């Protein structure tokens, strides 16, 4: 008999378009106050978008306004800077 493997949800990185397991991606969510937050738990309420944990994906998402489109909002300068700061600690790939 074969054992059933647990289904793991798949999500797509909005920058590189690579489909990966939800747990390997970083979720960003629009909070009630309109700010964009990094949702480490992946369970916050609100419209979300996923990015690979790679610096290049984060830079592309901010530079090409892909987050604005995916989250259906306009990122403020503070949000953009916070995302750039977070991406500085990510790997280069």
Image (spheres, rainbow, N blue to C red):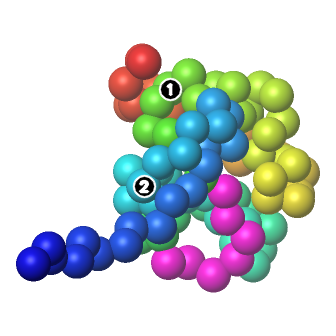
The image shows residue 83, relative to residue 47, as above or below, that is: above
Q: Around disc 1, counting alpha carbons within 10 Å, would you say few (fewer than 14), some (14 to 19), or many (20 or more)?
A: some
The residues colored magenta run: 43-49
Could you tell which of marks 1 and 2 lies nearer the N-terminus?
A: 2
Q: Residue at x 88, y 57 (%)?
A: 73
Looking at the rendered image, the quarter that the N terminus falls into is: bottom left
Q: Is residue 76 left or right of residue 14?
A: right
Residue 10: percent from left, percent from top:
51, 59
Q: How many marks?
A: 2
Residue 68 visible from this viewpoint:
yes
Q: Is residue 19 left or right of residue 45?
A: left
For this rendering, which residue is in front, 40 or 9? 9
- Mark number, residue 55: 1
Residue 75 visible from this viewpoint:
no
The image shows residue 40, relative to residue 46, as above or below, that is: above
> Quadrant location of residue 44?
bottom right
Q: Around disc 2, counting alpha carbons within 10 Å, would you say few (fewer than 14), some (14 to 19), or many (20 or more)?
A: few
Query: CB of mark 1 within 8 Å of CB of mark 2?
Result: no
Residue 82: percent from left, percent from top:
61, 42
Residue corresponding to mark 2 = 21
Magenta highlight on residue 48: yes
- Mark number, residue 73: none
């Amino acid at each position: 008999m074969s054992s059933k493997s647990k289904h793991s949800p798949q999500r797509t990185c909005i920058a590189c378009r690579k489909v990966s397991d939800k747990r390997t991606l970083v979720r960003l969510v629009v909070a009630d106050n309109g700010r964009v937050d990094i949702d480490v738990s992946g369970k916050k309420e609100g419209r979300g978008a996923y990015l690979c944990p790679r610096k290049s994906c984060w830079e592309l998402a901010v530079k090409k306004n892909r987050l604005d489109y995916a989250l259906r909002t306009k990122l403020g300068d503070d949000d953009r800077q916070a995302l750039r700061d977070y991406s500085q600690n990510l790997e280069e790939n």
